[in-house]
Image (cartoon, rainbow, N blue to C red):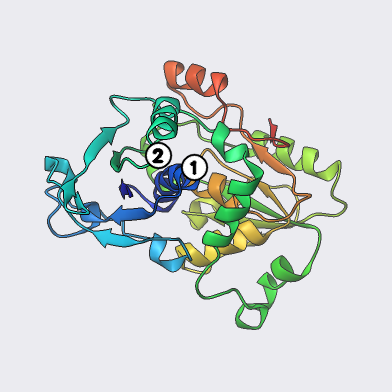
């Protein structure tokens, strides 16, 4: 079994699950999830919540051992080995699993130093299925202004990330009107009369910045999962420097989707240089 010790918000949880699921995909093992980070035992309480239960993920076991203290995680009567991203690269983990496909591990980390495995088309199809919501979207349940997302061919989901990024400007680039204008210009080369839907974790801030010089619909469902599923159901996506919109775009099942991502992700020089070496842009995506 591959046990994924979760941390972070929805986008990071998907990153962590996806890598564990890929190792299981390679070896025929099952995936377990450890949710200790979100429980009362965490000595550093978080506002984040366990989010993957809303999807159809293949989870063979849920547990809550204290992985911060490396509490033993027992599978088939044996304590399994912890693997931390602080000690090993993703490609090395993949190689190790190929050599010993029956060995169980508990994975610690966000696992974002290698994205190439996500270009595997069969694995992409598997994740599309596993991240279908347990409660499907139904146009009849949506506000009339949002129904085109499920019905029309020219919809473009645009993500604006703010909240914590506004106090982390030393780390993350704040994407402004120039980025969104350039991204929309690129989309308009192939999408006639795009119907634009704006998603944000701070909608009032996004509105106040007047980022768009064209009509847009602001999506305000009040639900993280609804926003995620609506964004991935737009035919095309303009993402922010955010794991939330990155994964929603990746899980967009439209075979003809146009995805635009930012060139300038970080304000930290070394992180930006690292990003430029492996920019997290998959086959057929664009950067501006």
Q: Which residue lies under the disc numbered 2?
A: 101
Residue lying at 76% horizontally and 70% vertically, measured from the top left: 151
What residue sits 14% from the left and 41% below the top? 70
Where is mark 1, residue-wise? 26
**Other-residue count near label 1 (Cα within 10 Å), few / some / many at <14 / 14–19 / ≥20:** few
| Residue 40 - label | none
Q: Closer to the camera, 263 or 109? A: 109
Does 149 sit left or right of 19 as displayed? right
* Separation (CA) of disc 1 from disc 2: 8 Å
Under circle 2, the secondary element is loop
Please say whether residue 36 is visible from this viewpoint.
yes
Q: Residue at x 49, y 29 (%)?
A: 114
Q: Is residue 210 visible?
A: no
Rendered location of residue 9, percent (x, y): 37, 51
The C terminus sits in image quarter = top right
Question: Which residue is found at the position 55% from the left and 24% from the top?
Answer: 278
The numbered mark, 1 or 2, whose residue comes first in the sequence reads: 1
- On screen, residue 236 versus residue 124, left or right, reads right
Instruction: Find residue 64 and report its horizontal and vertical position in percent.
Output: 20, 57
Q: Do the CB atoms of the residues marked 1 and 2 lie less than 8 Å apart?
A: yes
Residue 53, placed above or below residue 41? below
Tell me if 189 is positioned left or right of 274 in this view. Answer: right
């Amino acid at each position: 079994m591959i046990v994924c010790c979760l941390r972070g918000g929805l986008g990071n949880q998907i990153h962590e699950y996806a890598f564990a699921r890929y190792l299981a995909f390679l070896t025929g093992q099952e995936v377990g999830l450890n949710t200790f980070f979100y429980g009362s035992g965490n000595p550093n309480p978080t506002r984040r919540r366990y989010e993957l239960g809303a999807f159809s993920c293949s989870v063979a076991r849920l547990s809550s051992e204290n992985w911060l203290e490396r509490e033993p995680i027992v599978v088939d009567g044996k304590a399994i080995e912890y693997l931390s991203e602080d000690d090993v690269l993703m490609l090395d983990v993949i190689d190790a699993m190929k050599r010993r496909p029956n060995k169980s591990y508990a994975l610690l980390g966000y696992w974002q130093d290698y994205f190439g495995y996500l270009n595997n088309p069969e694995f992409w199809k598997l994740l599309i299925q596993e991240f279908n919501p347990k409660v499907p979207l139904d146009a009849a349940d949506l506000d009339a202004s949002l129904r085109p997302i499920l019905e029309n061919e020219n919809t473009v989901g645009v993500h604006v990330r703010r909240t914590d990024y506004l106090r982390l400007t030393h780390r993350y680039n704040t994407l402004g009107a120039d980025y969104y204008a350039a991204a929309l210009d690129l989309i308009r080369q192939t999408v006639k009369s795009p119907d634009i839907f704006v998603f944000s974790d701070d909608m009032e801030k996004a509105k106040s910045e007047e980022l768009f010089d064209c009509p847009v619909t602001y999506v305000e469902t009040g639900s993280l999962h609804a926003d995620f599923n609506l964004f991935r159901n737009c035919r095309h996506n303009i993402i922010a420097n955010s794991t939330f919109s990155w994964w929603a775009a990746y899980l967009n099942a439209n075979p003809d989707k146009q995805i635009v991502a930012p060139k300038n992700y970080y304000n930290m020089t070394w992180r930006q240089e690292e990003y430029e070496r492996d920019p997290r842009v998959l086959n057929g995506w664009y950067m501006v």
